[in-house]
Image (cartoon, helix red, strand yellow):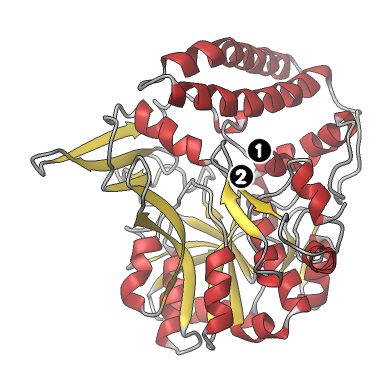
Amino acid sequence: MDIKEVIERGYCIGCGVCRAVDQNIGVNLNSFGEYIADLKNSSFDKIAEASNVCPFADNQNETEISDEIFSEQSQHEAIGRYLGLFAGYSIDDRSVGSSGGIITYIINELFETRKIDYAILVRSHVADNIRNIDFSFDVISSKLDVRSGSTSFYYPVTYSKVLEFIARNPGRYAMTGIPCFHKAIRLLKKQNPLYRDRIKYQLGLVCGQLKSALYFEYLLRRAEVPTGKVESACFRRKDSNGRADEYFFETVVRDTNEKKHIYRVSNRKIGLNWGMGLFKPKACDYCDDVFAETADIAVMDGWLPQFINDGRGTSLMVIRDKYLYDMMIDGNNKGRLYLQSIAVEEIVKSQQGGLNHRRKGLAYRLYMTKEPTPSKRIKPSSDFPLLFKVEQILRVILRNASRRAMVSQSKLGSGLFIFNLIMLPLFVTYRFLHQIRRLVKSTL
């Protein structure tokens, strides 16, 4: 499968790395609020080159890439290569991060020790759209700007513009991103020495799924934000007095008199099970990398029993780069970080839901998908219980239906009446299925 077929069959994730190969390739939002590459102005030779950096085309897989880079390190089937495994948080940055503030701490330290000249992370921007705001990768050049991108953004993003900046501006860069984006960057670095020399650190975020722009609009309507401009939005506002997995979507709106209004809705009240996969790109259902296996570090929420009741947040880390490992140990010794070693089994346990979906679930999706699919390390299989198979089929239906339902809702007015009308039967079916699965498990 080359990049052309990846796009035609709906597996493009919109990372934009192909545009670093050929500036004639466009990367634009489609009608479902997802970034998709456009090859119509590209040449046959350039399409072949772009296929070599596409994370869903047939090229090297994550294991092969990480084996080349981290060959001296321990290896685990689920998490890939690793040098150190930790749980912890940054003393100064914990309050502003989604979990323990570890990515913020690392970028600050890389600036402080002059290991980088620039960092690339997601920030909000004023935009010429109906809500007056969007979220995209941005280039920062000092510690002062780090905290503006220190939280999670459940919104589509692309590297296309920041890779242009890297090409034009010599320097040393650190890049944040989700697993498939890091794979694409590794492939680009193999192909082009300019990016290999300039991108020094790849900071990975463990990913359950990307979301389309429709998810942001859904959250705004779920929080009962009036139609119109939004000044700011935070997808994960922490409640330090609650549990680590209890947080808020929060947005700020100013009315015509410049009075500020804050709207909030808790993740518990949003009414969606994350596993449903609503507003998720198709590509996410054909990814088997949970732990950003090609990145220098993978950071995730510490949603384990020993950390879950601390609403201030705790991060889990899979560290692969030696310099980053030494940096974290030094930070702990100096009292700037709190770190504790953690067993690989605990790291796996923290992401068991994602692993089930991207390993067992993927095996069944590959089996039941009749069209060509991206090559995966997971082999197709139908050797699963009936209820598990039904759940996987229902998740695919939910993913597709949610995209169409929100597009219809956006065309037919404010609120969520149309969306809920279309989706309610599926929600009821999904929850009923989960109740049956719990009953079956309790009787075993």
Can you say which quadrant of the picture contains the C terminus?
Answer: top right
Image location (x, y in percent) of residue 184? 71, 64
Relative horizontal placement of residue 172, taking residue 65 as reference (left or right): left
Q: Is residue 238 visible?
A: yes
What residue is rendered at 60% in x and 81% in y? 200
Q: Quadrant of residue 276?
A: top right
Q: Is residue 242 visible?
A: no
Relative horizontal placement of residue 378, taking residue 114 as reference (left or right): right
Disc nearest the viewer among 1 and 2: 2
Image location (x, y in percent) of residue 156? 53, 49
Q: Amino acid at mark 1?
A: Gly
Image location (x, y in percent) of residue 226? 26, 29
What residue is rendered at 52% in x and 51% in y? 302
Q: Are marks 1 and 2 in contact (CB under 8 Å)?
A: yes
Image location (x, y in percent) of residue 89? 43, 63
User: Which mark is drawn over residue 208?
Assistant: 2
What residue is rendered at 66% in x and 50% in y? 13
Q: Amino acid at mark 2?
A: Gly
User: Which mark is drawn over residue 353?
Assistant: 1
What residue is rendered at 40% in x and 61% in y? 150
